[in-house]
Amino acid sequence: MWEKLFKELSFFPEGASTLAWEIDAIYLFAVAITVVFTLLIFALMAFLVIKFRRTDENFVPKPIHGSAPLEITWSVIPFVITMVLFGWGAYVFFKYSTPPAGSMDVHVVGKQWMWKIQHPEGKREINELHVPIGQPVRLIMTSEDVLHSFYIPAFRIKRDTVPGRYSVAWFEANKTGEFHLFCAEYCGTEHSRMIGKVVVLSQPEYDEWLRTEENGAQDTPVMAGQRLFSQMRCESCHSEGGVGKAPSLAGLYGTQVVLADGSRAVADESYLRESILDPKHRVVDGFSPVMPTFQGQLSEEQVLELIAYIKTLDAK
């Protein structure tokens, strides 16, 4: 019921994801509380000004030194409202900070002045993102040059893409159609032209779109990453079982890694990226810092492809 109500409110951008109505509900709640208390305060001011206006020149009012019940009331009520707003916002924040299991990974690279996108099946797009309805989509994003911000108003998601690191956002579209995609961070003279669209299709339409190849068959990120892994001779050090000069990569993704300084790190996309481009920064315990850097030798797309391949390596 509430979701339908929010969709009818014309002063909101169109909502087309599972996240949209929850964000709108929190916003409306905050606005409603603000309006109610503003009207209440002005009404009380008007009432008290009229009720206690001076009508007798000789009237001497009695001093009031405080009221414990009144002070408790005006302290407890705002506190409760604030905690409700905080708890509600925290619930939505954490819910949408962690992509659900089974999400479809899509790689996004921001560059002056375009969005370069690659699907897990290998399909590439520029300033367009095709997704199926009802499928959680996990965006793994970075930037090649300056700070950008990936923004889809209809989905209520906005996440900065930062050079040298990965940022993650996810959404689940619940309406088919075309929706605006913007860069919401000033990134240079052509910033206003860094726009695109998100196309939400039914699952059969999305499958058909994937089968439509304009320029012949395209490698998936995993296939391209496997080829790069071989070309760079990574297997000469990262042998199975970790008996070479470097630790084994089989089953590495998502695990806790013990480092030479005794600290631990989670082997996620950011850790793998750092290990490729700055391998001496965090060295695995028991190994020497002998790996050369590949900074400047690999593009952001190639790093993402290598990571996609490493994630598929089975510990078995």
Image (cartoon, helix red, strand yellow):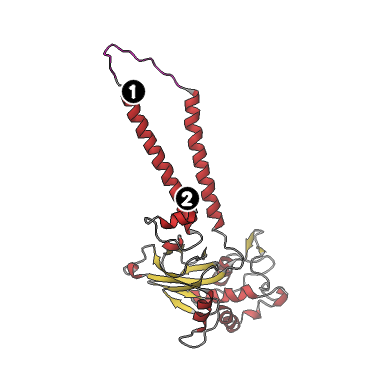
Q: Which residues are magenta?
A: 54-66
In the rendered image, residue 167, in percent from the top left (x then y), is placed at: 51, 64
> How far apart are the two marked residues, 1 and 2, measured between alpha carbons?
37 Å
Q: Which residue is mark 2?
A: 26
Dot 1 amino acid type? Lys
Image coordinates of residue 18 in percent, x first then y, are 51, 61
Q: Amino acid at mark 2?
A: Ile
Identify which residue is drawn at 57% across, 63% down.
99
247 versus 151 height, above or below: below
Judge by depth and name the residue closer to the eye, 174 or 292. Answer: 174
Q: How many marks?
A: 2
* Residue 51 - label: 1
- Is 312 positioned to the left or the right of 75 in the image? right
Q: Residues within 10 Å of mark 1 (few under 14, many from 20)?
A: few
* Residue situated furthest bottom in the rendering: 216
Whether residue 229 appears in magenta in the rendering, the answer is no
> Depth check: 289 or 131 in front?
131
SS of the residue at dot 1? helix
Task: Give the residue displayed 58% in from the left and 69% down from the top.
Answer: 272
Give the residue drawn at x 41%, y 46%: 31
Give the mark nearer the N terminus: 1 vs 2: 2
Where in the figure is residue 206, as x and y percent of width and height?
51, 77
Magenta-colored stretch includes residue 63: yes
* In this view, 155 is above or below 231: above
Q: 276 or 94: nearer the eye?
A: 94
